[in-house]
């Protein structure tokens, strides 16, 4: 049974969580965190590398010991170290560390002080007011814990897009090889490229649905068959991801892809347009009475209801029907439009590759430039640069640029926005940089007014070109900081400051809604990866999906411009 990259990375992250709760050596914790990040950045399956006898210790942050552990996970699907640690640390303490402001030490102290054994018991203690009585905690923290646990109870389980993709793409490729399958595609929220996916909807065109379903439910990764019929089956994979497979006639392909891609609101709008034309639209086709008049392709379905084809990323009933009717659908930005990446890290801070290696990887992607934006000094745990370090890096980048032909490394910095909105470096030093990305990395628990004022003050500094990952959210792990986004966007427009769309699939920050809000106010978006390795540059495609969901065109994106045009924009800032 194949082991996916996301599963190996998850095991290493879990080990790091447990070690952190035990207050283990921070370098040991970081080793597992870094290894997990390296594995996630790999475009090729780690399991394939193990089977082919490759030396995994050649990968960044993977020494011989970790390479051996990876091989063990690939062979057995398990890691004995994780089992040992899980027996020593209650899982509920690890879960509690996901609550904003509750780190490993505080979580362990809280559980020990109150004699807790589960999240349910923590919720009861918070409800009863016992958490506020623990030394170092208080009413505000107690309320935060209570709210976080209530939200956890009511939320459905969803998978980040990159994690879902790790399971979905190999599965649909396997389905295409089943005898009798003419073609197969993934529909639903996955096709609309939402940042999280609840389950997978897969369509397969074929005649013998029963035989195809029988083969499907026998897949190695199917843990439970929830339902099975002649044309449809629902299964749960060992990852916990539910998959619906529907086998449809080839003649219904376009109608079915439209119907099962959704969203529900978009489909309802489409059916109403069909009804206005005395037609009936469903997953089997578009009908005039009993006669099918369209359904082979999505394009003909849209055409018969008086619309051009609408890209799946736009199908959320947020005005796309009206825009299509008026011929005003946006010319969505494409990967080929990008000229560079404006937020990356090197091994000078917490990245894994040298300046030259990052530059070469960017050139291989066809970029004209790449901004190196290592952390500022406040980020000690991330190897933040001192003033002297940054000064030396500026000189190193200048020397490297003399060797490049048609490519430029930009000397930048991801400078911390401090609690009061001031910056971690002086204006004199920032003035020497090509690009300044200002980001929040601390004090996530300030209220909306204070957080908003903090960002506004940072944007007022003319040296700041981009606000990085504006809300600071980490999908499924940490909510974003409380912000009045309308004030942020309006101020960014007034100040001529760009906002970042961070393409890391853990962040995807800005959201699609905020991307569109920014563009509507004329605010430029920096579409960047925040890559900490050469492999991390590949995450740009997730950010591109988010940008397209936000209706962004090439003109809305700062880094679709060549260096000459970009530098002119930055200079005006």
Image: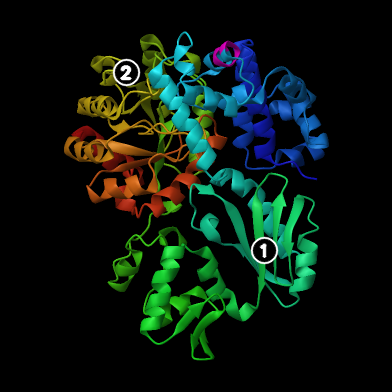
Q: Is residue 441 left or right of residue 417?
A: right
Residue bearing mark 2: 418
Q: Residue at x 58, y 29 (%)?
A: 120
Q: Dominant secondary structure of the magenta stretch?
A: helix
Residue 68: assigned label: none
Report the quarter where the N terminus lies: top right
What are the residue bounds of the magenta stretch?
Answer: 109-113
- Residue 174 versus residue 309 in the image, above or below: above
Foreground: 72 or 487? Answer: 487
The x and y percentages for residue 555 are 29, 51
Q: Residues within 10 Å of mark 2 (few under 14, many from 20)?
A: some
Asked whether disc 1 touches disc 2, contact meaning CB atoms under 8 Å apart, the reply is no
* SS of the residue under disc 1: strand
Which of the two marks, 1 or 2, is nearer to us in this view? 1
Foreground: 245 or 457? Answer: 245
The x and y percentages for residue 397 are 41, 23
Residue bearing mark 1: 245
Foreground: 235 or 506? Answer: 235
Say if the magenta span includes residue 518: no
Q: Residue at x 26, y 18 (%)?
A: 422
């Amino acid at each position: 049974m194949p082991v996916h990259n996301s599963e190996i990375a998850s095991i290493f992250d879990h080990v790091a969580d447990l070690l952190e709760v035990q207050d283990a050596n921070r370098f040991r914790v970081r080793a597992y965190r870094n290894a997990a990040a390296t594995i996630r950045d790999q475009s090729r399956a780690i399991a394939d590398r193990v089977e082919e006898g490759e030396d995994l210790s050649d990968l960044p942050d993977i020494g011989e010991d970790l390479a051996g552990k990876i091989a063990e996970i690939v062979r057995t699907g398990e890691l004995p170290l994780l089992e040992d640690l899980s027996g020593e640390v209650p899982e509920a303490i690890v879960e509690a560390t996901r609550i904003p402001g509750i780190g490993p030490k505080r979580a362990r102290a809280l559980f020990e002080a109150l004699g807790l054994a589960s999240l349910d018991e923590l919720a009861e203690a918070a409800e009863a007011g016992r958490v506020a009585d623990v030394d170092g905690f208080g009413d505000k923290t107690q309320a935060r814990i209570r709210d976080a646990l209530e939200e956890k109870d009511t939320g459905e389980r969803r998978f980040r897009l990159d994690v879902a993709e790790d399971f979905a793409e190999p599965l649909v490729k396997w389905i295409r090889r089943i005898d009798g399958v003419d073609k197969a595609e993934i529909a639903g929220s996955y096709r609309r490229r939402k940042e999280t996916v609840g389950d997978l909807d897969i369509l397969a065109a074929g005649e013998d649905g029963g035989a195809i379903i029988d083969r499907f439910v026998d897949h190695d990764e199917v843990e439970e068959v929830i339902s099975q019929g002649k044309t449809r089956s629902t299964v749960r994979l060992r990852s916990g991801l539910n998959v619906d497979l529907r086998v449809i006639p080839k003649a219904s392909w376009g109608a079915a892809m439209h119907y099962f891609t959704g969203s529900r609101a978009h489909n309802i709008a489409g059916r109403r347009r069909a009804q206005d034309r005395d037609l009936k639209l469903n997953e089997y086709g578009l009908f005039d009475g009993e006669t099918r008049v369209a359904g082979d392709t999505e394009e003909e379905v849209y055409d018969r209801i008086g619309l051009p084809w609408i890209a799946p990323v736009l199908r959320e009933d947020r005005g796309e029907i009206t825009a299509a009717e008026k011929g005003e659908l946006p010319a969505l930005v494409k990967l080929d439009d990008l000229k560079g990446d404006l937020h990356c890290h090197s091994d000078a801070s917490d990245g894994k590759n040298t300046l030259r290696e990052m530059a070469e990887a960017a050139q291989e992607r066809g970029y004209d430039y790449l901004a190196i934006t290592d952390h500022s000094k406040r980020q000690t745990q991330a190897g933040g640069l001192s003033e002297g370090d940054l000064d030396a890096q500026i000189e190193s980048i200048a020397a490297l640029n003399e060797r490049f032909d048609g490519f430029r490394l930009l000397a930048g910095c991801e400078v911390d926005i401090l609690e009061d909105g001031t910056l971690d470096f002086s204006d004199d030093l920032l003035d020497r940089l090509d690009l300044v990305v200002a980001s929040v990395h601390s004090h996530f628990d300030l209220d909306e007014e204070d957080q908003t004022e903090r960002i506004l003050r940072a944007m007022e500094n003319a040296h700041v070109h981009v606000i990085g990952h504006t809300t600071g959210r980490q999908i499924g792990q940490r909510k974003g900081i409380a912000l009045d986004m309308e004030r942020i966007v309006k101020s960014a427009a007034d100040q001529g400051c760009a906002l970042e769309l961070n393409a890391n699939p853990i962040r995807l920050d800005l959201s699609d809604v905020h991307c569109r809000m920014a563009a509507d106010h004329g605010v430029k978006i920096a579409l960047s990866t925040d890559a900490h390795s050469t492999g991390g540059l590949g995450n740009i495609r997730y950010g591109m999906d988010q940008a397209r969901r936000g209706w962004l065109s090439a003109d809305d994106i700062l880094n679709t411009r060549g260096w000459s045009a970009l530098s002119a924009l930055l200079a005006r800032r």
